[in-house]
Image (cartoon, rainbow, N blue to C red):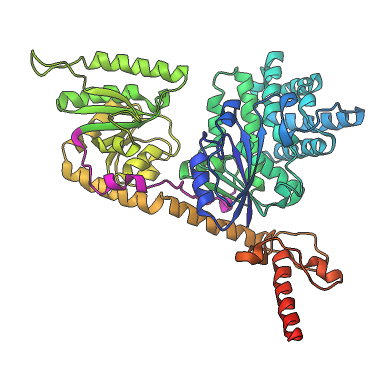
Amino acid sequence: MRIGLLTDGGYPYTTGESRLWCDRLVRGLARHEFDIFALSRSREQEERGLVALPPQVRRVRTAPLWAAPESRHGANKRAERGYGRRERREFAARFERLAAAICTGGAASPEASAGFADGLYGLAALAREHGGLGGELRSETAVRILETACRTPGANRAVQAARVPDHLAFAGLLERALRPLSLDWYGDDALGAVDLSHAASGGRAALPGLLAKRFCGVPLLVTEYGVQLRTQYLANAQLAAPVRALEAGFQLRLAAEVYARAELITPGNTHARRWQERCGADRAKLRTVYPGMAADRFHAVGEGAYGGDPHTLVWVGRIEPAKDLIALLHAFAEVRRAEPEARLRLISAPVRGAEAHGYLAHCRALAAQLFPDEAADAHAVGDNPVSFEELGGPEAPELADAYAAGSVVVLSSVVEGFPLSLVEAMFCGRATVSTDTGAVVEVIGGTGLVVPPRNPRALADACLALLRDPERRSRLGAAARARALELFTVEQNVTAFRGIYLELMSHNPVHRENADDAAAPQPFARPAESHVPGRWAAPTAARVGSGAASSRVPGPLAVLMRDHLDIAEEGAGA
């Protein structure tokens, strides 16, 4: 089977959220072929290069959507030529419907959904026939259409407050979001040649899959391990309120259209599934597939080779405000008063960005204030019970070493999607204390303690309960490891998608042009005999008899017929 894997800012580059699970999926399904269609996020990401790709990846096509349309390069570039009068009228009509749907409230409005689909596919058809849309989407006409749509009765109240600077700002965001409409990926030499489009996330990554289904009839599978709509909304926190409302309206309409057209949607957890249902996804199309994670690197810790300090709490993750380390430090102050030997190790990935560095400095200052350096006696050096460490350092050179450092792992987040660090702690057989956010309760499943977020007192009580009860720690850790090995391994993830691929293809046979119009549709784009192993699969000119039928013999089958003819000729000569 030939899969078109659609990514946005991740695989096959060395950075990005979807890099690891996509790579494990591709390597685990070695009997399928993959064409990767990647939307790159930045110049730096492209310069860092691709991961080492397995042989089943036939080709990679990249669209650098971070660049301005006129500076785009490579095979993805489409002509940004000016439109004539007729094309401008067509653009205005389609864009009016799109803008009206974005400004109208109500995710489940059939009229707005139909208007959005008509506008989106109309613009895509216009770009396919007459070139890119970048110039028109940045034009004065587009801005005036947006202004009119915002003032239309029935528009959202926040949208009605938009002014000209807001319209200009949103027009720029919309032009960037709709750049996949202008790509040259929707022909028989690209997405039109695959058996199935698999979008590695919702939102912009799924947009090429929508067009491939519209233009080429290719079925679409959408996987969301995070809530793309929520992620986009949080990422736009710095925008003005009207622009955020317009952007949210667009993302909501796009999500609803993707969910409506997809054959199957695979959320990574129940938390994401609830968001998808609220955005209009049909329950019959939803099937939860947990992300697969590599468990082998945690084997030694999980099997008990490293017991960990019984007085140490460990936190592992990224330094950012959503992790609420402030509440964790205040909770640890309560723990320290009750258990003077307790320690807290905060182990993070390398800190990047001004916001993260500022938050880390604030946490360090709070830790110094709450826990002045303590010395055992007058001749000893003072020591702080809270340590800030980075992965790769001498104390935690590997991720498994971080979890092996203590006996209890703590997660204090106020915002969390699928808690990867929690699963890693479960692989290590560690008892956990977590805040009730995102998919935490679903992941833990009763094998750890869960407390309300932003409640340092409850967090401290749960940590103390486990620090003081080693038998309970051991029992919960063993149950957590068993649960993680059953549900969250790479093997279960790959097995799930192997079955989903075959199931979708059994319901969506590929219709290809055939010399005989009455022939039944093929279940796959390439016939099975094209994968015959050994020398028969090598491209060799066929020496078969003349006639119209001989031109339709597949390459490997022609080689097989040639060998039979050679044997027959040798027998005749004898």
Residue 462 higher or lower than 212, as above or below? above
The answer to which of 18 and 569 lies nearer the viewer is 569
Q: Residue 345 location, x and y as percent?
A: 27, 28
Q: Does the magenta-highlighted stretch encompass residue 364?
A: no
In-image side of 462 versus 529 (left or right): left
Quadrant in which the C terminus is drawn: bottom right
The magenta stretch is 282-311
In-image side of 233 versus 553 (left or right): left
- In the current view of this chain or complex, which residue is farthest to the front? 574
Q: Residue 328 location, x and y as percent?
A: 30, 26
In-image side of 30 versus 446 (left or right): right
**Exactly how many numbered labels are in the figure?**
0
Query: Which image quadrant is residue 6 in?
Result: top right
Quadrant in which the N terminus is drawn: bottom right
The answer to which of 304 and 531 lies nearer the viewer is 531
Q: Residue 369 location, x and y as percent?
A: 25, 13
